[in-house]
Structures are given as C-alpha cells and as structure tokens.
Amino acid sequence: MLSRALSIVGPALGGSVRLFCLPYAGGSAASFAHWQQGLPPWVQLCLVELPGRSWRFLEAFAHSVSDLADELAGELRDHATVPCAIYGHSMGSLLAHEIAVRLEAFPGTQLRKVLVSGSPAPTRRQAASPPVSRYSDAELMGLLTDMGGTVADVLADADLMRMILPRVRADYALCENYRAAEAGTMRAPITAIYGDQDRHAGQAEMVFWGECSRGDFSLHGLPGGHFFILEQEKALLALLAAELEDCRHFEARTG
C-alpha cells in the first residue's frame, strides 16, 4: 500500500508488529525496503518517506522537524492502532522521537517501542561550527566520503551528486534548526543502537537517549562506524527482530 508518505511492504499477519522506518540525512526510506527479507514474517515493514525523495521527489524539502513530525504523525495515526514500533537512523532518530511523542497523544495508538541509532540524544545535541548545511559542495562530499554511507560510484557521478547534495544540505539544515521536545515526554521504551567506531554517535552519546522516555531503556553496540547499519546489516536485523519480539508481548512500564 502506498500513500503520501507511507509504503507498507510486508503483509499483515496474525500477531504481527508494524515497524515504521525513517531515513537518515540525504537518504530515502526506500533503502530499507529489502529489510523485509531479513526480518521475521510477523514484522510488517512500513517505509516512511520524506518530501523531496523517492515517490515524493517533486515535493519541497521540509524546513522544520516539528512541522514534519506533525505531518507524519497525522498520517501514521490510523496505521498505529495495532502493535507497532518506530526505527530511525541519524536524522531519522530525531524524527522517530518527535513522531512518537505525537502518536502517544492520539487515543487508540499502540506504539510499543522506539528504536534509534546514529544520533546523539535530542537533549544532548551540540551545534556544529560551521553548520554542515553551509559547507561547500566539496566539503560536503568530503563529509559523505568520511562517514561511509555513500558508495564511491555515486560520489564519482557528477549528475547524481547534483541531485543528492541539495537534499543532504536541506536535511542537515533541518537537523541544525531542530529544538528537542522536553526530556522524558515519551512513555514507550527506547532501544538505542550505536556503531563502536562512530565518532559522532558512539556509546557515550547514545546512552543519553535514556533521558527521553519514562519507559525502559536499552543500549546495544555493533561493530562499525556511523553507517554500521550497512556494514552490519544482518546483525542489526537480528537485533531489531529480538527487540520487536518483546513488542508482541508488551506490558507498558513507566516511571
């Protein structure tokens, strides 16, 4: 099923858990579509796409995390009345947090877990100087190369990069203008996952995601850098499956 922002990939089975996936800066939720093959059949993969990419290519980029979260939560609301979880990487983690806060305000939603990776906790983010959104194209390409999330063939394709760089720049501006919701405003448990070689969002930064919810918190590390989600995809999917198994037998615990 395809809607303005949501594409549901997996079938709805008895006892299934919906997993809403949000992309990282410059990325597309469509890059998660193949995950359905590596997840248990009871996980129903749901891709949440952002303006300016994939099937939303003709839409203008978002300028406010808050406004974007309002839009996405409003669309996910009717799809979150069954057991569900949200996963986001890097920028997607910030969106996952903000969407979760909004979904919990809607009656009847069954958000059972928020899974995040690759981003410091919203309450602990520090502004880059100068802002990445103001980098030159060469500097931005250097950053993408250093972080490892963009394949060399794409970086070497001038036409592709002319399409991708404005999206990356807009996404960084979105994050730079973000102001977090109050700490501990969420009830759902949070699972934070980090790459043990990630210089921007390693264990020391990811541990503070525990401040963002009154529910349970767990922290897991996997080998790799910022894009360990690509380097350790099999291990990541196994970890997500184990975390989502808990959602099938969920009892809310809040402090």
Image (tube, rainbow, N blue to C red):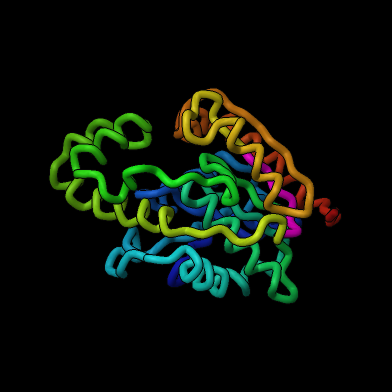
- Left or right, 124 with reference to 253: left
Queried whether the magenta region covers residue 189, the answer comes back as yes
108 or 10, nearer to the observer: 108
Q: Position of residue 23 (x, y in %)?
A: 45, 51
In this view, which residue lies farthest toward the left?
A: 158
Question: Residue at 24% across / 49% down in the picture?
Answer: 165
- Left or right, 228 with reference to 209: left
Q: Position of residue 181 (x, y in %)?
A: 60, 61
Queried whether the magenta region covers residue 63, the answer comes back as no
- 81 in relation to 216, above or below: below
Q: Position of residue 162 (x, y in %)?
A: 17, 50
21 or 125, nearer to the observer: 125
Q: Which residues are magenta?
A: 186-192
Q: Position of residue 86 (x, y in %)?
A: 61, 54
Quadrant of the rendering where the C terminus is positioned: bottom right
Instruction: Name the image quarter holding residue 238.
Output: top right
| Residue 46 in sight here | no
| Residue 181 in sight here | yes
